[in-house]
Image (cartoon, rainbow, N blue to C red):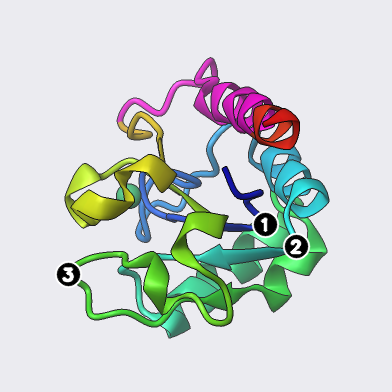
Amino acid sequence: MPHETVIALDLEGTLISNAVSQFARPGLFQFLEFCRLRFEHIYIYTAVSDARCHAIIYNLVARKLAPMWLSEISFVDWDREFKDLGNIPNVAADRCLIVDDNRQYIKDDQVSQWIEIAKFEPPYPDTDRELNRVQELIDRRLAQNKTL
Ligand SMILES: [Mg+2]
């Protein structure tokens, strides 16, 4: 199995509540730092417009809920139908992971690269540990890939 070097992160329902309320999911800062350590490239893969996404990230960084480097992150350009990993530049789809709460966006032939995360939804509990759970899952997956 190839070593996955790129991770694409959904925004709404995955990292934050939604583009309006913009509540950071518990463990967001630590999860992003984990991604930066483990992957060569990180992308935001979201249906939210680039301009709005920049504003959301600006707010998260300003409130110290996300690391400063997030301000420099690239967004994947897509048709708003499928979050095709083929849209990520210069890398094969099987070297990318995508963390998303919405199965509908995942192409059937890329489900193996999908890391499912439960939607962050009202009442947005402080006790939500999904980012931590997903982090451990990715950690195990990468370690396993290395030994295969
Ligand atoms: Mg989502």
Q: Which residue is mark 3?
A: 81
Circle 3 Cα neighbour tier, 10 Å, few/some/many (<14 / 14–19 / ≥20): few
Q: Main secondary structure of the magenta part?
A: helix
At 68% from the left and 39% from the top, the residue drawn is: 31
Rounded to the nearest angstrom, the CA distance separating label 3 from label 2 is: 26 Å
Range shown magenta: 122-141
State which tag comes first along the sequence, 2 or 1.
1
Residue 25 locus on image (x, y percent): 53, 37
Query: In the visual, does 94 lie left or right of 38?
Result: left
Which label sits on residue 40?
2
Element type at mark 2: loop
Q: Position of residue 68 (x, y in %)?
A: 80, 64
**In the shown orientation, is residue 127 left or right of residue 67?**
left
Res 5 label? 1
Mark 2 and mark 1: Cα distance apart in space: 5 Å
Magenta stretch encompasses residue 134: yes
Q: Is residue 93 above or below residue 71?
A: above
CB-based contact (under 8 Å), mark 2 and mark 1: yes
**Real-space Cα separation, disc 1 to disc 3, in angstroms:** 24 Å
Give the quarter of the image for residue 121.
top left
| In-front residue for pair 113/9 | 113
Residue type for callout 3: Glu
What element does badge 3 sit on? loop
**78, 21: nearer the viewer:** 78
Q: Give the residue type that dot 1 points to.
A: Thr
The answer to whether residue 138 is visible is yes
> Which of marks 2 and 3 precedes in the sequence?
2
Residue drawn at x 67%, y 31% is: 148
